[in-house]
Amino acid sequence: MSKYAIISSSFRGNSNSYKICKALEEALSLNNEVKLINLVKVEMNFCLGCGYCEHNKGVCIRKDSLYLALDSIRDYDYVIFASPMYYGEICGQLKTCFDRMNSVIQNNSIKKMALICSCAGPLEEKSIIKESFNIFVDNFKSCKNQGVYIYPSAFMPNSFANDKNQEGFINKIVSDFKEE
Ligand SMILES: Cc1cc2nc3c(=O)[nH]c(=O)nc-3n(C[C@H](O)[C@H](O)[C@H](O)COP(=O)(O)O)c2cc1C
């Protein structure tokens, strides 16, 4: 049994990326411990860039509920993030979460991370989001980048909920994580 954390960052009602997280939670929970964190419900402050965490074993000076949420995933095996695509990138909520994860870099046992991104456009290269996610994961020295999973053509809310192929999208992520 492995420990998975899934972090959803869309603030939209009937969000596609959140629905993907819920389906993933259900699929993974059959054989694993899974924690789903929905940033809509988390009090978040920006990273101050103060460096306090770098000199204090990963303890963040900002004692908000984002700190508690991130502190709880240090010993998880796998972390999967989900975001809507905003102007070719992740949304601001997830960027704030990534910035604040500077405190997790200091002290963690995460083996793999992946990013799911829901977007209105087609499934094409999306090189900016892939490159910036790689830069983020590179900071976690013993952690592999499992990749960026683009969910395309999802302009409207609830697109994923009404998608007949949703099982295929979820199964691909689940099987990729099983491979060492
Ligand atoms: C501010 C904003 C910027 C967006 N930028 C893009 C974009 O660059 N490329 C794209 O394909 N879709 C873009 N979209 C559409 C969303 O990515 C799309 O609707 C996505 O499915 C939303 O995910 P969610 O339902 O999980 O919130 C944008 C939407 C908003 C509100």
Image (cartoon, grey):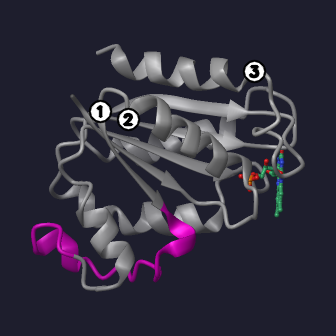
Query: In the image, residue 109 lies at what x, y percent?
Result: 17, 43
**Residue 97 shown in magenta:** no
Q: In which quarter of the image is the C terminus?
A: top left
Residue that label 1 marks: 32
> 10 Å neighbourhood of mark 3: few (<14), some, or many (≥20)?
few
Question: Do tag 3 and tag 2 residues touch (Cβ < 8 Å)?
Answer: no
Tag on residue 29?
2
Mark 1 packing: few (<14 Cα in 10 Å), some, or many (20+)?
A: few
How far apart in space, not on screen, are marks 3 and 2 (Cα)?
Answer: 20 Å
In percent of the image, x 21 and y 54: which residue is there?
A: 74
**First-in-chain label (3 vs 2):** 2
Q: Mark 3 points at which residue?
A: 165
Q: Residue 95 carries which label?
A: none
Residue found 72% across the figure and 34% down from its top: 151
Quarter holding the N terminus?
A: top left
Expressed as whole percent of the image width and height from the top left, the position of residue 33 reads 28, 40
Quadrant in which residue 61 is drawn: bottom left
Q: How far is mark 1 from mark 2, CA to CA?
A: 5 Å
Q: Give the range drawn in magenta.
A: 38-59
Q: In this view, does 111 lie above or below 140?
A: above
Identified by mark 3, the residue type is: Asn
Q: Is mark 1 on a helix, strand or loop?
A: loop
The disc labelled 2 sits on which kind of residue? Ser
Which residue: 41% across, 31% down? 28
Q: Where is residue 99 in the image (x, y as percent from the top left)?
A: 43, 66
Q: Which of 134 and 8 is in front in this view?
A: 8
Q: In this view, does 120 lie above or below 127?
A: below
Is 151 situated above or below 168?
A: below
Which secondary structure class fits the magenta region best?
loop
